[in-house]
Amino acid sequence: MGQYFGADTPKLGFGLMRLPKGKDGKIDVEQVQEMVDLFMAAGLTYFDTAYVYDGGDSERAAKAALVDRYPRESYTLATKLCAWMGAHDEESAKQQFYTSLERTGAGYFDYYLLHALQAGNYRKYDEYHLWDFVKEQKEKGLIKHWGFSFHATPEILDELLTAHPDAEFVQLQINYADWENPAVTARANYEVARKHGKSIVVMEPVKGGALANPIPAVQDILRSANPAASFASWGIRYAASLDGIITVLSGMSSVEQMEDNLSYMKNFQPLDEVERTAIQRAQEAINGVKSIPCTACHYCTAGCPKRIPIPEIFAARNKQLLWGQMEEGRTDYAQAVENGGRASDCIACGQCVRACPQQLTVIDYLKDCAVQFD
């Protein structure tokens, strides 16, 4: 790998989107503190949260587990401004920045991102003058580096990087399952970012946990190549082995996941030729299976008028599609809809489609789930 912005950053970042929860449904701060301690002791420094994660509780957890317990210069903190979720006008969008400063108590952000730009919302960031706003905060010293996270086509990414050449980095969804996925265009987006000389922060390296427990054919391939390696390690090391990567975010939900990630990322080694061949075979196996490529980000559920637990329903259906576990899928579905809407309750309002960073045809998938489950 050559020199680029962020080349010296440790290649594992702690994503604070899927933090462990207690029985009360709230973030288990004590467990997060233990995870932070392990992460910092391993010499890793990059933490990533967002204004909208867990209704702001992710940023509050960052304060309690990290900011209040470690010297400010010992870590780097990233957070994000979402102009299309939780913002109703330019003023409320910009207020997210100040609210994030208050929640985290960080004083400044090492990395600040315009959040989840997609085909249906990216012009909102121009309308609210947010590109200029983040640059103003950098001039004030409240932001060290700024960029944006992205879920759309390479053509839109090229348009954005051409219009905003001073963006310092881009956060992209990259994993071996989505490298050639036409709905995600991971490879093409990676190539556009590098063409513009931009460094990359990787999100969803294990595809919302799906690659931590991949389909049986992939498990067999990866076990044959390295029986001792966890399945998650393949996804994270695959992404970290690419050129131009600042860090790879792992949304860890337990101490055990943290310990597993540290076991191979504390002293990261890129994939070798044998491992790359195994990944190619795994990609071929995945491409032969039909499933719902949901990453369980839950962006779709916040505004659902029928309170349909869409990611949980899709997970139940995938249990049938990927594993042939028909009865288990029905049981999971019944549990998922106990306190929410059923798949057949969908009124096709389109809110979920507009919110989905994977650009899934959510309504069509729900129709299929309704046929199977309702």
Image (cartoon, rainbow, N blue to C red):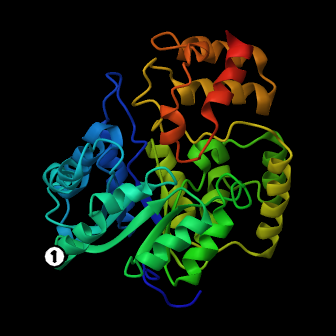
- Quadrant into which the C terminus falls: top right
Task: Please say whether residue 10 is visible from this viewpoint.
Answer: no
Q: Can residue 168 be seen?
A: yes
Nearest the eye: 25 or 87: 87
Q: Which residue is mark 1?
A: 141
Mark 1: secondary structure = loop
Q: Say which quarter of the image contains residue 77.
A: bottom left
From the top left corner, tell me how far across and down residue 190 is, in percent. 60, 71
Q: Quadrant of the N terminus?
A: bottom right
> In the image shown, does 164 or 44 lie closer to the viewer?
164
Question: Residue 168: where, in percent of width, then height?
Answer: 39, 78
| Label 1 neighbour load within 10 Å: few <14, some 14-19, many 20+ | some
Q: Is residue 90 above or below residue 188?
A: above
Q: Is residue 3 left or right of residue 180?
A: left
- The residue depicted at 26 percent of the width and 48 percent of the height is 59
In-image side of 308 versus 98 (left or right)? right
Residue furthest to the front in view is: 127
Name the residue at 44% across, 61% down.
149
- x, y percent for residue 105: 14, 56
Depth check: give the residue in front, 333 or 35.
Answer: 333
Q: Residue at x 84, y 53 (%)?
A: 221
Q: Amino acid at mark 1?
A: Gly
x, y (%) of residue 49? Answer: 34, 53
How many tags in the picture? 1
**Residue 218 left/right relative to 270:** right
